[in-house]
Image: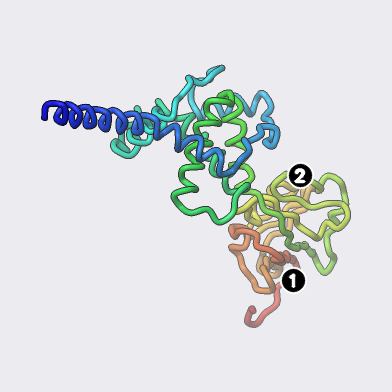
Amino acid sequence: MKFAKKKASTLIIFTILFTLVIIALSPYFLYFYGLSVVGKNPDFNNYKHLNGEQSERYWEQYGKKTDKNQYFTPWVFVISSYCGTKYPRDHSCNRKYQKLNISSHIAKTHVKENTNNLRNITWHISTAAYTLWIYNHWSPAQIVEAVTELERRSTEVSFYAFWGIETFGTERDFSSPKYHNQSPDVFIQSQDPRIVHIRKRGVTWGNFLNTLPMKLTKECLVTETKQTFCSTKDKKLDIRLNGFSDPNALDKKIMPEDYLWVSYTYAKTGPEN
């Protein structure tokens, strides 16, 4: 009887200890499982390097510059997640785990680009694992540079639109190099300056025209040689977007295959389109 009780007590203690060990090791099991889902680690060389000035500017955004991250175990990741969930308004959590948080942006991209049709729970486990891996294996500078590159890519687009300016029936010439490639976000080129190339989401017609050595408003066109064409009683500056007169066209985002046409000529009586 005593032996049976002792055996039962031993079994209970063993079960408790075994359960505690499993609980203690479970974040590590999940960590290595999450890494195995993708099977390859992120390569920092896939991301654009910032120059010195850009790096300093982004460090101002992401906090104090450091040379090395404090090593985090899977359990620290669990604690950081609990901190952010339990106390979402506690800014000390964000400050303490800030670079761990921004590492998650890189991890999400890495998992998305290297897997297909993952179940929701598997995707979260893998993303969490690579967030921790990146934090522990990349320097703070690499993390900041990589997440900055991802932010840049998220706003990047590639499409074209058309434009032209006409004064008294003569189309203006924009073949001079001073008009070409004036911005990485929106520009015209020498091959055909009537085509506007857009590389950043949300660029307006006003943004585009501001890159050129000229000025256009609702009422006036001022060329690079200071020629001025303003609406008067007998002359009219007409700004048309996709064939319709639109005085607010400059404030509108450029859309694929838009057509902006600006004309200055003698005013005509009668209804407008």
**SS for callout 1:** strand
Q: Quadrant of the N terminus?
A: top left
Would you say 182 lies left or right of 1 here?
right
- Of residue 99 and residue 231, the one placed in the foreground of this image is 99
> Which of the marked residues, 2 or 1, is nearer the chain's N terminus?
2
User: Would you place residue 178 above or below residue 268 in this image?
Assistant: above
Q: Which residue is mark 1?
A: 266
Q: Which residue is mark 2?
A: 182
**At label 1, which amino acid type do we have?**
Tyr
Would you say 141 lies left or right of 90 here?
right
* Residue 31 visible to the viewer: yes
**SS for callout 2:** loop
Q: Which residue is painted at 72% across and 58% down in the image?
A: 159
- Of residue 59 and residue 144, the one placed in the foreground of this image is 144
- Mark 2 burial class by Cα count in 10 Å: few <14, some 14-19, many 20+: some
- Of residue 12 and residue 215, the one placed in the foreground of this image is 12
- Of residue 179 and residue 3, the one placed in the foreground of this image is 3
